[in-house]
Image (cartoon, grey):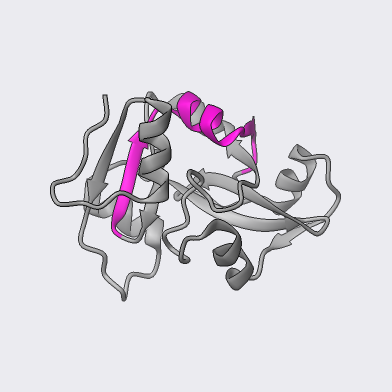
Amino acid sequence: MAKRTKGGQGTPATVALEAARVTFTVHAYEHDPAAASYGGEAAEALGVDSARVFKTLVAEVDGTLTVGVVPVSGQLDLKALAAAVGGKRAAMADPAAAERSSGYVRGGISPLGQRRPLRTVLDTSALDHPTVYVSAGRRGLEVELSPTDLAALTGARTAPIAR
């Protein structure tokens, strides 16, 4: 079942995982405010292949906030994200709007336990791994879980949205 970090407080993401009774592991590391890439920092700090660590990016597709979850080793293909949800145009969302909608701060936005759940697309490469890592809801905290559980809990569709 779930493993928690010592002395760690729950986040909306870990609370959602516990409520769903899925197997997950929380991994904490010391966040460096000077880090150039939150996801890259997580992969390096945890000693995990960056293809297994996924970043949560909030975009606007035809005016609707939409989450794209892609490996930190790649980039979000906005055109592919729009196509995956039947849209025409996509652009990265205003960071303040992403924070307000999710309830998380930039660099700690989790696809799980969002204040206002958004339609979500998970890059198909996640299915190549037995487990993947996503933000647990704050900088310096990642959660490891199966990609199928991640997709089920977020209502995500899978599509090739990374390049």
Extreme-front residue of the structure:
19
Q: How many marks?
A: 0
- The residue most toward the bottom is 34
Q: Give the range drawn in magenta.
A: 140-161
**Can the viewer see residue 53 in this picture?**
no
Q: In this view, does 77 lie above or below 20?
A: below
Asked where in the image residue 2 lies, by quadrant, the reply is top left
Q: Residue at x 56, y 36 (%)?
A: 154
Q: Which residue lies furthest to the right in this view?
A: 88
Residue 7 belongs to the span the image colors magenta? no
Q: Does the magenta stretch include residue 143?
A: yes
Residue shown at 58% from the left, 70% from the top: 95
Q: Position of residue 7 (x, y in %)?
A: 14, 51
Left/right of residue 131 with respect to residue 71 in the rendered view: left
Picture layout, residue 21 above or below residue 6: above
**Residue at 53% in and 50% down:** 114
User: Residue furthest toward the left?
Assistant: 6
Percent x, y of residue 25 = 27, 35
Q: Quadrant of the N terminus?
A: top left
Tell me which corner region of the image, top left, top right, bottom left or bottom right, holds residue 52: top left
Residue 104 % position (x, y): 47, 61
Nearer-the-camera pick, 150 or 122: 150
In the image, is 100 to the left or to the right of 143? Answer: right
Q: Position of residue 13 (x, y in %)?
A: 41, 45
On screen, residue 107 versus residue 49, left or right, reads: right
Identity of the residue drawn at 33% across and 26% down: 23
Residue 153 visible, this orientation: yes
Between 70 and 22, the one lying in front of the other is 22
